[in-house]
Image (cartoon, helix red, strand yellow):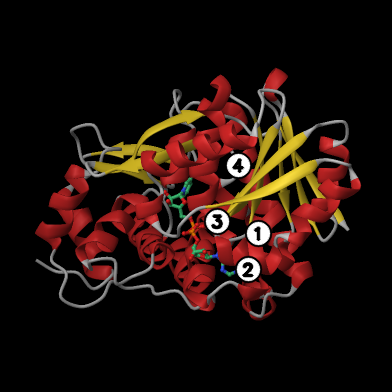
Amino acid sequence: VTDRVRVELGPRSYEVVVGSGALDELERLFSGRRRVAIVSHAHLGAAKGDVVREPLVRAGVENQLFGMDEGEEAKSLATVERLCRDFARWGLLRSDAVVAFGGGVVGDTAGFAASVYHRGVDVVQVPTTLLAMVDSAIGGKTGVNLPEGKNLVGAFHQPRAVLIDPALLDSLPDRELRCGLGEVVKYALLGDHALTRLLEERSDALLARDPAVLREVVTRCVAAKAAVVAADEQERTGRRASLNLGHTAGHAIEQATGYALAHGEAVAVGLVFATHLASALERIPPGDVDRAERLVHGLGLPVTAPTGLRVEDLLALMARDKKSAGALTFVLPGPNGIERVDDPDRAAVDKAFAAIGVTS
Ligand SMILES: NC(=O)c1ccc[n+]([C@@H]2O[C@H](COP(=O)([O-])OP(=O)(O)OC[C@H]3O[C@@H](n4cnc5c(N)ncnc54)[C@H](O)[C@@H]3O)[C@@H](O)[C@H]2O)c1
């Protein structure tokens, strides 16, 4: 069974296919093509690469695996250069294509390599982490880090398709699953009430990685992301900024703890902070805060920051966040939906910090 979500971008529109047969789509997509370069980590390619290779072989497409190292360090221009040189030596042409098979690190790096190799070759994203399935593989943002900062070099390069088989998550470490769950809760709080109910009622099955529940959860998140991307492909109207819900405080908490908290855990605390702040500013009723906290807690994610963090330190980190241009900027729920709120009342900010266990 597969679900299909279309990302509407005129001539660059594409489908996100979610479900157990999703990768079979590679056969149809690439039939008649000559060569496809598969980019992945060595361990993923060895353990699971056949799910990509088999449909390509059935389509009569020559394919080869190109490995890249793990982690943010490997998301670099050096890796892009190495991949492009390996593609060139293998003879990958403008009319050939790349498949990115991995989490956000592979997707961002291979996607960027595809965007510049021969001035752009087709890429298909096959995400293998929950975060990549619900977020990074969709929307065409690709790029790498510089020593000066994360994601500083990149390009918008929409994939030809995104193919998601939630069964690939069976081997994902728990910590990486939590990274994705933080983003899943975000989509629920962005206003998907059906997703909220699903997370409330089926949290045990979700945490046990039940494929049917995973498919439904991933499809709902994909639909939410696809709608935002279609409305604001290149982050110009502010609509795509709504996806930063929970991230202002989340990023600051993640950095202040020296990354002891996984990104998704920090985002979860950031989401709780954002709902408290919205309530303190009388943008939402207090009952919404309780529900959000229960949702986060029910998925095994933290609702308070680790002890020892201080308000002033977090505010300083937030002010440095590249996404806030000068003012202290939050993305908060309210009567008109998710909106940007600049420099909110300090007493409300302190109240929200106190609610997640952070004091001056
Ligand atoms: N482009 C975007 O729009 C966007 C959005 C959000 C995040 N990102 C980026 O995504 C990156 C984070 O991605 P991530 O959280 O997927 O991390 P990741 O790609 O580093 O993957 C996490 C770990 O899981 C392993 N792994 C992947 N799939 C596995 C599987 N099925 N089984 C076992 N292990 C598996 C990887 O080898 C890695 O060690 C960051 O660099 C971030 O900047 C990009």
Q: Is residue 249 left or right of residue 92?
A: left
Element carrying mark 2 = helix
**Is label 3's Cβ within 8 Å of ligand 1?**
yes
Give residue 321's position: percent from left, percent from top.
Answer: 24, 43
Tag 3 residue = 103
Tag 2 residue = 199
Q: Quadrant of residue 99?
A: top right
Q: Cα distance, mark 1 to mark 4?
A: 19 Å
Tag 4 residue = 138
Q: Cα distance, mark 2 to mark 3?
A: 23 Å
The answer to whether the residue labelled 1 contacts the one labelled 2, judged by CB atoms less than 8 Å apart, is yes
Q: Cα distance, mark 1 to mark 3?
A: 23 Å
Residue 257 is labelled as none
Tag 1 residue = 195
Disc nearer the start of the sequence (2/3): 3
Disc nearer the start of the sequence (4/3): 3
Q: Cα distance, mark 2 to mark 4?
A: 22 Å
**Quadrant assignment for the C terminus:** bottom left
